[in-house]
Amino acid sequence: MKIKYPFLLLVLSFLSACTYNQKIRDGKVAYERYQFDLAASLLESEFNTEKSRVRKGQIAFLIGKSLQNTKEPEAAIKWFGQAYDYQYGPEALKEKAVTLKQAERYDEAIRAFKELGFEIGSPYEYRKDITSCEIAKAWKKETISFRVFEADFNSAQSDYGISFLDKDNILFTSDRFPSSVDSKSKSESTYNWTGNAYSAIYQYNKLTGSSKTISFTDLSKTSNDANPTLSSDGNTIIFSRCPVVKGLEKNYCSLYSAERTADGWTKPEELGFIEEEANYMHPALSSTGDTLFFSSDMINGWGKFDIYYSVKESEGYAYPEKLGRNINSAKNDQFPYMINDTLYFASEGHTGLGGLDVFKVHRLPGGAWTQAYNLKTPINSGYDDFAYVPDPFFKATDKVSAKGYFSSSRNGTEDNIFRFEKTIPVEIDTPDIVEVIDYKIKLDVYLLEKVYEEAFNPNSKVLGRKPLEGTISFMDNQMEIGADGLLSLELDADTDYEFIGRKTAYLTNSSSFTTKGLGEDPNNPIQSYELEIVLDKIYEEIEITLDNIYYDFDASNIRRDAEPTLKVLAKNLLLNPKITIELASHTDCRGDEDYNASLSYKRALSAVEFLIESGIDENRIEARGYGKSRPYIDCVCSKCTEEQHQANRRTTFKILE
């Protein structure tokens, strides 16, 4: 899915209409405004006239990123190669490798990932990518039990995410303009990020072949409505709504419900468990209607987006709980769909063919889940494949066991809906064998350190991680870890584990793992998982910038979106009780010096108070406000770019001893 639709983003940024009406003559500006077709054209002209090799590398990289977003992988691969040749660095080689995998050129992708590991000094970082390419090659040779066809109600815009209203009508999401919209109304209802309409929920009738938008009583021209799910009687709809509100720095997606009426649907109401400053998306009701699944980037998640569930109670839906580690990964896990005892979902974190792949898990007696199973080709491809929904009204025949729909970006520049048929394989008679199954849960724990672009600068770009010698402690055990950084274990069922990694001259860190909720699956009796513990070197008297610490204008209170970073710092201080730190806040060069010094001190003090409330002894933390006296980037104030101002507006910590 392209960046234009917000379900892979943590926030939505509002872009004013005038931004898109202005004539753009600069490729970088076009890229920053998501006009990727124009950006690629302008940037290529700039590349051809540029003399500097360094600048050519920067331009070539942006061309590659633009072509990625317009779904032209072959052209993108060429430009990422150019960027790397012009010394743009490992990031260009990484994008080339990822795009080669997306284009299903797996052998070339493997070579690129191996070269990338050598480039950054850590083959460890890309071993999963190499393994998944090897697996994808094998999967493409397997017997295919699916037939896939493009749905006949797709448009030239994005279409995705369906739900069944009844056996003859389905709901889906599209950002097409309705055929009845005139030019004036079209101008008023254009979402400037995409140049298309705001996404809306459409109803498609199989018998007539017609599509129309569904009507809510508060139909808004300035929100993206998407991914509907329906109760079994078709009278309740739950969907995600992403409002675009002018003047807000951030807009978040939420979940709404409405009831069916004779004329359409009632005014949507936000679900009761929604919290501020998080995105809630991709709702899906279970077959029984008593459980709502959805994806969210709430602060207690394990990755970018995780899948949660909420049980329906007499007064509404209960506070959500995360699904377990056999479903949620360190990357995006989204688009759940529950039918009977099977949960389908899309993930970037499990082994797959490229971007998002469709997986399934089964719920076992007692509520545990099996390991995730990749649906393979032709459901999955090198592109994003998601929103897999079997047809609950289809009755199996002697040749076809299931029908339904899924969404994919595999064709062209937009998402499209595909329908599938699952054929029944020929059965081979085999004798019944009574077998005693030995169930095992295996865990590989890796002790790692960060690899920085500048070896002794912890504020430089993190290129990856590499194995580290040291010790790992868990329960009453302490194990010495060799140069491969690996500890392999067999775990007990239904148990919580805490692993603590240590090494001299590094900050102690920990990671947790639970075997609770991991079911005994006869088809996969040996379940294998990985866990990483990343240690940071101790850099005394060097200021380290804390990412994602933001403050509202002219305010010093800690915002909710800053809390995860401060919680990580608090955890590190608790695990390293002998160190003391200075926590400081800095402003950019604009404004009065005394005022900036005072404001920055108040901001630093707010962060310190948060740490004290988290259990840190106040004698271990010193608050300092430096105002604009110590810029990270020393530029002439009137000529500083906004990026330079942002780099100077930072919160830092420094280990004193």
Image: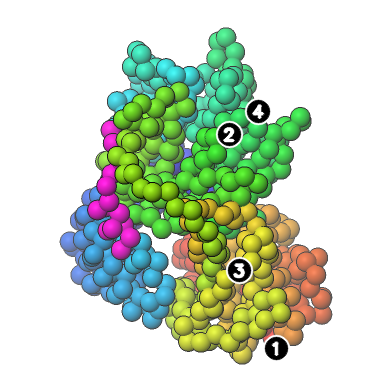
Farthest residue to the top: give it: 262
Within 10 Å of the Cα at label 3, are there few (<14), some (14-19), or many (20+) other Cα atoms?
Answer: some
Of label 3 and label 1, which has the lower sequence position?
A: 3
Q: Are marks 3 and 1 in contact (CB under 8 Å)?
A: no
Task: Residue 316 in the image: state x and y as whole percent.
Answer: 72, 32
Callout 1: SS: loop
Q: Which residue is mark 1?
A: 657
Camera-near label (2 vs 3) is 3
Camera-near label (3 vs 4) is 3
Callout 4: SS: strand
Within 10 Å of the Cα at label 2, are there few (<14), some (14-19), or many (20+) other Cα atoms?
Answer: many
Camera-near label (1 vs 4) is 4
Looking at the rendering, in which quadrant would you find the N terminus?
A: top left
Of label 1 and label 4, which has the lower sequence position?
A: 4
- Magenta segment boundaries in residue numbering: 134-149
Within 10 Å of the Cα at label 1, are there few (<14), some (14-19), or many (20+) other Cα atoms?
Answer: few
Q: Which residue is mark 3?
A: 491
